[in-house]
Image (cartoon, coloured by chain):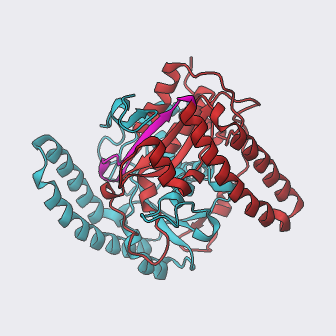
Chain colours: A cyan, B red
């Protein structure tokens, strides 16, 4: 079997929120987990670990937490998109409908990968700034992206979620990760109910990049 | 030409800190930038933009800032690795030597991609927690990882750096990104001086993943 090309994987990686409950073959799961380990981290310290949830009770308990977070989030978001143009509003509504499905079926995902991180093993260069920090994410989100790309290559649906970070202490009680470890993301995996990965909608290079200075067209 | 496989790219992506000054073909640069645009972001809002530095004066000015940050960082780090075992210490010293090289030759990189982000366009679910936030990074670091993987596919060296975040206001004065935008990462790109990408050293899946609960062997 020919390996999926890297550009092909990146350009067709969608957020797939409708997942079948069929179990995942061990060797497939092993490959997508290994892909995450390859990611760069600051000083190559790999300051993350991840918990793969397959136990039905743990999936159900995290699913209840997720559904609560989703309900809080989606209320505000549905109000926020009311003012958008018709096309953008329709695309946001499709995303919300898929999000509703995920919140209802979270526990049916055959595996959920919860990424934890240790802030004490990170050189967080924006920690002292007068704005929210993002630099710690540079030592864990590349691993998440690798996992997603590997899922794409394997035909597994997946979606990067961060809502559970809001209820980190409840998650800690369920999963047992120690202080000072926190949760950076949770990724449900499974074969897609519908078409899965495919075409994506993104801004072009000319809208995302500037040349030499802010505002100067690429 | 056959496309580089996604697993091959991920498993051979190294931090390449010694870069040749040769200019990059436009079509190569365009492909690696486009790869970044494909990354997932929260709500598909793509709350990042990036500035591609090729102007010699801007590269030199950011290089002076980077060298100052590096000097501050490396002093503490050299002290910290003194207590490590011989093998780990040697690998850290190789990394520091390559870091010295990058700090001295920053401005010679043919292009430096500075990733900016807008925290007001992000749902930062860990903002209220009593720990440093990382969730904003989940909407920009996957784009950085895509850029790195595309560089790997193109034979370009590259390295994810975050030291410049420490001097965000000086960077803002040079590059003109407006408040509330901040800097998440800077990635110098160029063809490698030495071997470039290749074998990497990472912990195995069994050391990075747990099954169902923290500490339970995968």
Q: Residue at x 61, y 36 (%)?
A: B60
- Residue sitting nearer the eye, A192 or A9: A9
Percent position of residue A190, x then y? 41, 53
Q: Residue at x 38, y 76 (%)?
A: A167
For the question of whether residue A148 can be seen, the reply is: no
Left or right: where A161 falls relative to A37:
left
Q: Residue at x 79, y 60 (%)?
A: B78
Q: Is residue B42 magenta?
A: yes
Percent position of residue B125, x then y? 36, 67
The outermost residue toward the bottom is A173
- Residue sitting nearer the eye, A178 or B32: B32
Quadrant location of the N terminus of chain B in the rendered image: top right
Percent position of residue B151, x then y? 57, 32
Q: Which residues are magenta?
A: B41-56
**Placement of A134 over or under B98, stated as above or below:** below
Label total for image: 0
Q: Is residue B143 magenta?
A: no
Quadrant location of the C terminus of chain B in the rendered image: bottom right
- Residue sitting nearer the eye, B99 or A130: A130
The outermost residue toward the right is B86
């Amino acid at each position: 079997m020919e390996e999926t090309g890297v550009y092909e994987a990146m350009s067709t990686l969608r957020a797939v929120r409708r997942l079948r409950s069929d179990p995942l073959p061990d060797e497939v799961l092993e490959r997508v987990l290994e892909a995450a380990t390859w990611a760069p981290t600051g000083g190559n310290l790999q300051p993350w670990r991840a918990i793969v949830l397959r136990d039905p009770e743990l999936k159900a308990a995290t699913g209840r937490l997720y559904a609560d977070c989703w309900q809080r989030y989606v209320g505000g978001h549905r109000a926020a998109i009311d003012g958008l143009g018709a096309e953008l509003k329709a695309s946001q509504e499709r995303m919300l409908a898929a999000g509703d499905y995920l919140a209802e079926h979270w526990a049916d995902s055959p595996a959920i990968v919860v990424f934890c991180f240790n802030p004490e093993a990170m050189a967080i260069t924006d920690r002292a700034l007068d704005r929210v920090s993002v630099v710690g994410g540079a030592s864990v989100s590349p691993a998440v992206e690798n996992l997603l790309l590997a899922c794409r290559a394997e035909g597994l649906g997946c979606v990067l979620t961060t809502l559970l970070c809001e209820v980190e202490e409840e998650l800690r009680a369920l999963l047992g990760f120690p202080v000072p470890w926190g949760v950076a993301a949770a990724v449900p995996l499974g074969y897609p109910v519908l078409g899965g990965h495919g075409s994506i909608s993104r801004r072009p290079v000319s809208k995302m990049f500037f040349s030499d200075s802010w505002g100067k067209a690429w």
